[in-house]
Image: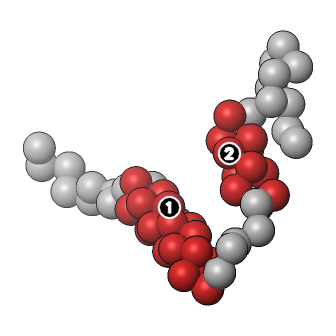
Amino acid sequence: MAKTSGNKPDKNLAGVVRDLEDAPVNSLDAQQRQQDVNDRRRRDNHNHQHKVDMDPSH
């Protein structure tokens, strides 16, 4: 696990590791977990899309 300054584990990576350690109970649980991953990926992608403003008029 990645360490930050002060030898404290990164909170985001700790959550990912915790999610990966648990095995899905059945197919519905596996599907819901995969959907959570997809939603997280979609939110992350949406939050990092920065359009460059090419119009210097304002």
Outermost residue, top direction? 6
Give above or below for 5 relative to 25: above
Depth check: give the residue in front, 38 or 56. Answer: 38
Residue appearing at x 74%, y 49% in the figure = 18
Q: Is residue 21 above or below residue 12?
A: below
Q: Nearer the viewer, residue 45 or 49?
A: 45
* x then y, percent, for residue 27: 61, 86
Q: Residue furthest left?
A: 58
User: Answer yes or no: do the residues labelled 2 and 1 have beta carbons within 8 Å?
Assistant: no
Residue 14 x, y percent position in the rendering: 74, 41
Q: Residue at x 88, y 42 (%)?
A: 1
* Colour approach in the figure: secondary structure
* Disc 2 residue type (three-letter): Gly
Horizontally, residue 18 falls left or right of residue 1, namely: left
**Residue 27 visible here:** yes
x, y percent for residue 46? 39, 62
Q: Give the residue type that dot 1 points to.
A: Arg
Q: Quadrant of the C terminus?
A: top left
37 sits to left or right of 39 = right
Residue 43, quarter of picture? bottom left
**Which label was assigned to residue 40?**
1
Q: Residue furthest front?
A: 25
Mark 1: give few (<14), some (14-19) or many (20+) Cα within 10 Å.
few
**Badge number at residue 15:** 2
